[in-house]
Amino acid sequence: MKILVMGPPGAGKGSQSSKIVEKYKMPSISTGQMFRDAFNANESIGIEAMKFIKEGDLVSDDITNEIVRLRLTKKDAETNFLLDGYPRTVTQAVALDDLLEEMDTKLDAVINILSSHDVLFERMEQRRVCKVCGASYHLRFKKPVVDKVCDKCSGELYQRQDDTHESVKRRLEIYETKTKPLLDYYSKQGILYNVNGMQSFDAVYEDIILVLDEI
Ligand code: AMP
């Protein structure tokens, strides 16, 4: 199964994706996480990408397409993968289709998690992320057992540089102008499935599984 999980920033793509890949035993490919890992490892691509990320801007299509090409052509992505947060522009979507065609394959489904801007703002400002494993918490709804410490790996929790109010506003604007047109792109391919993201985490997950078990 080759799928992609879409939605505005803060819709829960990352947390839902982690649970989906655990169930279906598939690699999760998150461009945002790859950029953050490269930055934490002091790699030049990560340092370059972080200049855009912390302002709430998109990283260039060229850098992003390249990092995905390198990852998708690895052996473990041959039969199954989940893409989280990529593509985010029509240029990236076309590049992905070209790459998949070269690999003689295609996407099976695009899951789109819908949410309102109010809910998204609240979620992102209260979000804390583990520096080590990337697990995501919410200061009110999904608190870690010990303050500022990850339940899963005991790593330190921090607020992402792009989860500030100004940056969130910018990311939502960019989502509306650059990423939303992709919904039409995938709807025309007949592989778009919308899921209501304004429910509990478990209810959203169950709706996604209902879709994936049917394809
Ligand atoms: P995410 O973890 O998916 O919220 O991504 C965090 C940030 O990484 C985004 O706000 C962008 O700055 C950057 N990023 C992630 N994926 C992409 C992409 N497909 N294209 C461009 N920039 C991206």
Image (spheres, rainbow, N blue to C red):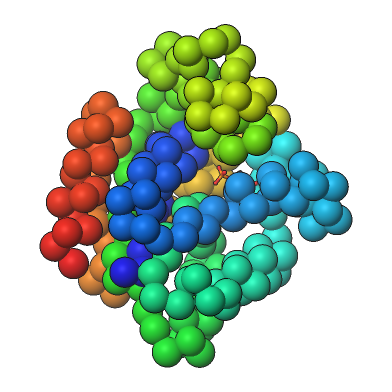
> Residue 96, relative to residue 124: is it above or below?
below
Residue 116 versus residue 40 in the image, above or below: above
Residue visible at 43% across and 11% down in the picture: 140
Q: Observer-nearest residue: 196 or 100?
A: 100
Picture layout, residue 5 above or below residue 138: below
In-image side of 51 versus 29 (left or right): right
List the single residue furthest toward the front: 153
Tell me the quarter of the picture where residue 101 sits: bottom left
In this orientation, does residue 162 appear? no
Q: Quadrant of the C terminus?
A: bottom left
Question: Left of 194 or right of it: where is 71?
Answer: right
> How far across and down, in percent of the image, does residue 177 sit?
51, 51
The picture places residue 102, in percent across and down from the top left corner, at 50, 89
Q: Between residues 26 and 86, which one lies in front from this camera angle? A: 26
- Residue drawn where x is 26% and y is 27% of the image: 200
User: Residue at the spot x=64%, y=27% of the render?
Assistant: 155
Q: Nearer the viewer, residue 195 or 103?
A: 103
What residue lies at 40% left-to-right and 61% top-to-bottom?
26
User: In the rendering, at what x and y percent does residue 136 appear?
Assistant: 50, 30
